[in-house]
Image: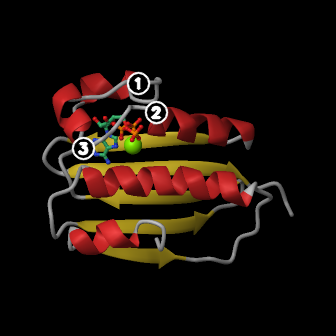
Amino acid sequence: MSICQPRIEERQIDVAIIGDGNSRVAIDPSLVEQAIVNLLDNAIKYSDNAGRIEIDVNSGDSELVISVKDNGIGISNDHLPRLFERFYRVDQARSRALGGTGLGLSIVKHILQAHGGRVSVESLPGIGSTFRIHLPNNGV
Ligand code: ATP
Ligand code: MG
């Protein structure tokens, strides 16, 4: 959150961190931080000013799930299968104007693969998106 703070303030977005912080999984902290920052950066970019973002941490028996939920522009179903490909952008013109290269989500995918985990997405146009990173609970 502190990495994205200047843009959060500029856009007057309300970011809440909820959920429990008690689980322990073995991770590369700088890589997982980069994955979460990429998701948070997207949530800010593809939200209206004064939007709301929730970062939720949930530990289950087999995995730790960190979700980043926004109430921004959303993504229609037909784009979801290709979303994590390098350079894939839903709206070329809009993403270019926002300074995107289309690499963020493919980096997130590779970081999660390196952890034996995965990234998932649920989204509705006009309602918002939830991206989740799933980290296997390796009993640390
Ligand atoms: P970069 O991350 O390299 O700066 P980018 O943000 O355009 O560029 P990705 O992070 O890979 O690229 O995202 C790919 C595309 O998915 C984006 O261009 C955008 O169209 C869509 N997208 C990603 N996250 C969201 C979101 N939270 N809400 C709506 N659309 C999103
Ligand atoms: Mg991005």
Q: In this view, does 49 lie to the left or right of 59?
A: left
Q: Do the residues labelled 2 and 1 touch (CB within 8 Å)?
A: yes
**Type of amino acid at the residue the image marks with label 1:** Phe
- How packed mark 2 is, by other alpha carbons closer than 10 Å (few <14, some 14-19, many 20 or more), is some
Give the residue type at disc 2. Leu
> Please, what secondary structure does the residue beneath circle 2 have?
loop
In this rendering, the answer to whether 104 lies above or below 10 is above
Residue 103 got which mark?
A: 2
Q: Mark 1 points at which residue?
A: 87
State left or right for residue 23 relative to residue 75: right
Image spot of residue 120 (x, y percent): 48, 41
Who comes first in sequence, dot 2 or dot 1? 1
- How many angstroms separate mark 2 from mark 1 (CA)? 5 Å
**Left or right position of 44 against 118:** left
Structure colour scheme: secondary structure
Residue 47: x and y in percent read 21, 55
Looking at the rendering, in which quadrant would you find the C terminus?
Answer: bottom right
